[in-house]
Amino acid sequence: MNRTNSWFVILVKTLIVSGLIIIVLNVYGNWNHSKDETYRKKKMTIEQIEKSEPIHFLDVSGNYKESFWGTKINVSGKIVNRATVATYKDAVVRVIYYSKTKTVLGSKDYVIYELFPPNSTKSFELKIENYKDVNSIGLDIVNASNK
């Protein structure tokens, strides 16, 4: 074997070993990061988890009807807090307006200024504007504050 070939072989072997080391370190680094994230989540208390994600624990439902003149919509709804320890306040309910073809025509947010203790249900009433071509509405919780 001549000298040029031996240097070439050494260079190729060095690149292969370096590549393998980089791959192993990258895989171990990602695994270790994932392990730390899992540990951190396990370490969070139930209250911390519930306080960090209020929209996952609040549900809204309701019925509605148009006013006599059709210019307003009267909404009778309920907000349920399924959290076991967290109390929320000032829930933001989004009203979504739909056409006959279920196309979203728009939406508007309303704050329900109430306290929502754990495992509770609160009723609310809204009198909201009705818009042209609205066939139905939907309700969704988009935010809430921690007490």
Image (tube, helix red, strand yellow):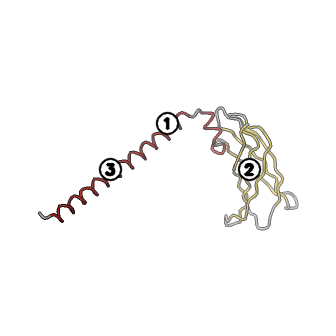
Task: Tell me which label, 2 or 1, sits earlier in the chain.
Answer: 1
How crowded pointer 2 is (Cα within 10 Å; few <14, some 14-19, many 20+) is rated as many
How crowded pointer 3 is (Cα within 10 Å; few <14, some 14-19, many 20+) is rated as few
Give how far across and how far down residue 98 sits, in percent.
71, 62
Answer yes or no: do the residues labelled 2 and 1 have beta carbons within 8 Å? Answer: no
100 to 78, vertically: above or below? below
Viewer-nearest of labels 3 and 2? 3
Left/right of residue 47 with respect to residue 93 in the rendered view: left
Where the C terminus falls, by quadrant? top right
Nearer to us in this view, 43 or 62? 43
Q: Quadrant of residue 71?
A: bottom right
Q: Secondary structure at mark 1?
A: helix
Q: Quadrant of residue 3?
A: bottom left
Distance from Cα at disc 3 to Cα at disc 1: 27 Å
Circle on res. 93: 2
Name the residue at 63% across, 33% down: 47
Give how far across and how far down residue 101 sits, in percent.
67, 67
Q: Which amino acid type corresponds to the residue marked 3 in the rendered image? A: Ile
Give how far across and how far down residue 133 sits, in percent.
76, 67
Circle on res. 21: 3
